Image: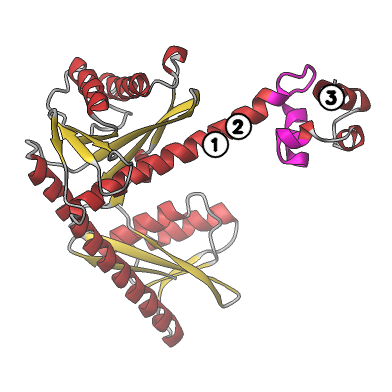
Amino acid sequence: MISIYKETGKTCIQVFFFRSKQNWGNQAFYPKHDPDDDIKEILSSFISQFYENKTIPVLIITNYEVSERKLLEKTFSKKESKQVVIKQAKSKNEINISNLAEKNAKQALTQKLIQSNKNNDLIENLAKKFKFNNNIDLIEVYDNSHIQGSDSIGALICFGNEGFIKKRYRKFNIKNDKIKGDDYGMMKEVLFRRFSKAIKEKSGSLSLPDLVMIDGGKGQYSVSREVLNELGLHDLPILAVAKGRRRNAGEEKIYYKNKEFILNKNDPLLFFIQRLRDEAHRFAISTHRAKRKKNLSKSLLDQIQGIGRQRKRALLNHFGSARAVESASFDDLKSVEGIEDSIAKKIYNYFHE
């Protein structure tokens, strides 16, 4: 059951999933389209894209007539090698479920529009507070993560009036060994790589943001400004957010154009800035942990001659981690599929001799 609701040029589509007449849950989608696009066209385009990489059910019921319905039916039927029917809700039961899905779509879209307006207000207040010369639609926030210089990564998250834009999140593995553990050097490398690429490859790269926010103080602000100026991005504003002396939330110092700003602890704008910084920090930490875990598994097993990719995968699947392989007995090791006695002995000796 697919129901669409459109308001003020925005759309929400609710998909209810049924198997053997039982509801298996529902999901909301917000397709991108021109504000004046017709509902039938939006619905047709959504259904076509939605089932691009999914198994198509034999029956799809909608709350509106679908544009090019017969062509979709023919395409879907050919793909699934069985008859697929797309129809508008007609029976009493179908209409009841269709209306419920449409009601859900309306409620979800209303909430999204309210949140979008709140986000717009927060972004506008941010622009007014710091007197930015340009309109702010996209904000990029940067943070670094490492442990004593190991597994160093840079992280980028993005925020717009729709909220956090996950598809624009990026991670950067620090390439220059000399700067791993140097927060200033790491930030310089990340910003240079991100913005030099955007300038060189205008197509296929992330579009430029309207504001850059970084986790750090005066020093971080200075090196970031230096990189953007070097690339000719003199007008792209930067905010640096530094934790207070006791590193308590609410005591942040914000740097812009080498001036220091301290916002009131109850200022909604401060909560907004904290929210952006915390999301960048969360993404940086989770990305760093994933890299560290991967490198830990890699470094332990890749040092043993004769352990190729398939054997390594078999060992990790069986034991769960490289550390568990290290503490495994000889008998446990040779019980793993693809690990012969000679290889098991080599692994055991490597960790115990």
Three-letter residue code for mark 3: His
Quarter of the rendering containing residue 312: top right
Side (left or right) of 44 relative to 323: left
Percent coordinates x, y for residue 275 in the rendering:
30, 49
Magenta region includes residue 306 = yes
Q: Are marks 3 and 2 in contact (CB under 8 Å)?
A: no
Percent coordinates x, y for residue 103 in the rendering:
33, 76
Side (left or right) of 277 relative to 305: left
Report the span colored magenta.
Answer: 300-324
Side (left or right) of 41 relative to 286: left
Q: Are marks 2 and 1 in contact (CB under 8 Å)?
A: yes
- Secondary structure, mark 3, is helix
Percent coordinates x, y for residue 69 in the rendering:
39, 62
Quarter of the image for the N terminus: give it.
bottom left
Q: Which residue is mark 1?
A: 290
Q: Nearer the viewer, residue 47 or 215?
A: 215
Give residue 352's mark: 3
Q: Nearer the viewer, residue 70 or 154?
A: 154
- Secondary structure, mark 1, is helix
Q: Which residue is mark 2?
A: 294
Q: Nearer the viewer, residue 67 or 218?
A: 218
Residue drawn at the location 29% of the way across and 32% of the way down: 216
Which one is closest to the eye, mark 3 or mark 1? Answer: 3
Q: Nearer the viewer, residue 107 or 349?
A: 349
| Visual colour scheme | secondary structure
Give residue 275's mark: none
